[in-house]
Amino acid sequence: MIIAVASGKGGTGKTTVAVNFALSLRNAQLLDCDVEEPNAHIFIKPHFKERKVIYIPIPEVDESKCNGCGKCGEVCVYNAIAIVKNKVLIFPQLCHGCGACTYLCPQGIIKEVKKEIGIVETGSKNGLQFSHGKLKVGEMMAPPLIKAVKKKRLKDKTVIIDAPPGTACPMISAIKDSDFVILVTEPTPFGLNDLILAVEVIRKLGIAFGVIINRSDLGNDEVIRYCRKENIAVLMQIPFDREIAVAYSKGIPLVEAIPKYNNEFKALYEKIRENIGHQEAKTQRKI
């Protein structure tokens, strides 16, 4: 089973949930796909055994043979190629490495060169398998690196994915193909606004999901009321607790600092299994 942990905004406690959820399970794997700012390793402290540089293919044009037909610019859906005065301008920051320009060039004069976008590191700690990606400073293309991290998935494990915050392409790349998504939010106007956006995205993707409310005793009850109105399961509530904050500041996982949460995260796993079962039953009835 693949369970992604996401949030509509940063700072809600998404990584806290992902890390402690993974640590509470047996036979688990944690994939930190927040490649622009990975920090799960601070709490896991894994022993890394593998480091792989990740590249994407960038087009390179032989200008001495180019007739300026413009076909490469037409087929590039990411606007990474422009034709100016019969010259081909390539914008590597926008290129997704799809290869369409190379494949469809009528003259066959475009070749691909490798461009480094980041690294993927893999290791483990006390039986928990761990991988994360680190996007190279200055690079904007997170999805290819996220896909590289997801390729480290072990099929015999319960996989927990720490997704990037927000609702843009990186988040969608991370949660795609998951069996369930946990949306972590906070009971504030900003938390509710971004939760609503995230819910809309996940519903369009057709993935089962539920909500965890972090710092649940702060703010107001608008998030609870919204979830009730939308028939969204609130899977867990984590209070604003000084002991939790102190442990976090020291890089100590919640399940180690306050052992009772170990059972709470195990109970969360069972709730998710039940939720997925209900979703599958509804789908079968519709069919």
Image (tube, rainbow, N blue to C red):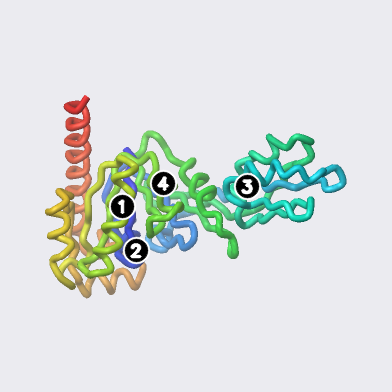
Secondary structure beneath label 4? strand
- Res 9 label: 2
Secondary structure beneath label 1? helix
Which badge, 3 or 1, comes first in the chain's sequence? 1
Which badge, 4 or 3, comes first in the chain's sequence? 3
- Residue under the image location 16 percent in, 58 percent down: 226
Which badge, 1 or 2, comes first in the chain's sequence? 2
Image side of residue 233 versus residue 126, left or right: left
- Residue under the image location 55 percent in, 48 percent down: 50
Residue under pointer 1 = 23
Three-letter amino acid code at disc 3? Ile
Q: CA distance from mark 1 to mark 2?
A: 24 Å
> How many C-alpha atoms fall within 10 Å of the one at disc 2: few (<14), some, or many (≥20)?
many
- Res 129 label: 4
Quarter in which the C terminus is drawn: top left
Horizontal and vertical percent position of residue 185: 26, 61
